[in-house]
Image: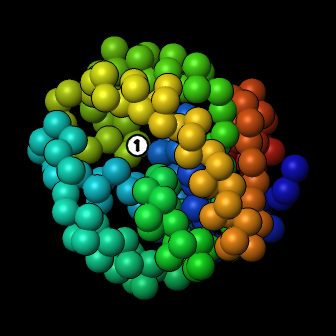
Amino acid sequence: MIPLEALGTRMCIIGNSAAGKSTLAQHLGQHLNFAICHLDQLAHVPHTNWQPRDRELMRLDHQTFLIQHESWVIEGNYSYLMPERFAQATAIIWLDFSRWGSVYRFIKRSLQNNHNRAGNLEGASQQFNFTMLKHILITVPKNKIKYQELIEQSGVPCVRIRSFHQLKKIYKEWNL
């Protein structure tokens, strides 16, 4: 596995919904003292149940974050912003798990109703919805081809983690 030090100072974490992107970003940011950006928090209006913000406002906030911070970890997909993000990234970490494992984690996370989890939207009271379940089951598998193409076009080194078991090993190897 690639040593953490080899990933540089600007990391993008992408992957399935409920794969653990936010938690990994939180651990990496705290361990390395890097700024952390959870894209879901830029994409939605706080104190709502995940009401989307205007895409251009999100793009501006995304660009501002990239400019303001020298060392960062950004987690989330939003493929329309990936080219900008990847152009400045030193590494991409792709949590490319089975959609069924992500469905299980999404349902479990929703039932726990943990409002303090990393990446959660401030003030959101609803955690489960069928739209997200459909997204995990149908949209995520289709996005893998797009993500692979964007990664290849970027030329940025990518650590592709294909299972929760492998992710646990990474946590241990990187002392997270």
Q: Position of residue 40 (x, y in %)?
A: 34, 51
* Visible residue check, residue 93: no
Report the coloring of the rendering: rainbow
Determine the residue positioned at 74% across, 73% down. Answer: 155
- The local crowd at label 1, few if under 14, some if 14 to 19, many if 20 or more residues have their Cα within 10 Å, is some
Q: Position of residue 145 (x, y in %)?
A: 65, 49
Residue receiving disc 1:
118
In what element is the residue under mark 1? loop
Does residue 160 appear to the left or right of 70 in the view shown?
right
Does residue 115 appear to the left or right of 165 in the view shown?
left
Determine the residue positioned at 26% across, 44% down. Answer: 121
Q: Position of residue 67 (x, y in %)?
A: 42, 85
Query: Which quadrant holds residue 60?
Result: bottom left
Query: Which quadrant holds residue 33?
Result: bottom right
Q: Position of residue 91 (x, y in %)?
A: 69, 66
Q: Which residue occupies the foreground of this view, 31 or 133? A: 133
Determine the residue positioned at 74% across, 59% down. Answer: 158
Q: Which residue occupies the foreground of this view, 146 or 95? A: 146
Does residue 66 appear to the left or right of 145 in the view shown?
left
Q: How many marks?
A: 1
Determine the residue positioned at 83% across, 58% down. Answer: 3
- What's the amino acid at mark 1? Ala
Q: Which residue occupies the foreground of this view, 96 or 31? A: 96
* Visible residue check, residue 51: yes
Which residue extends farthest right? Answer: 1
**156 shown above or below 92:** below
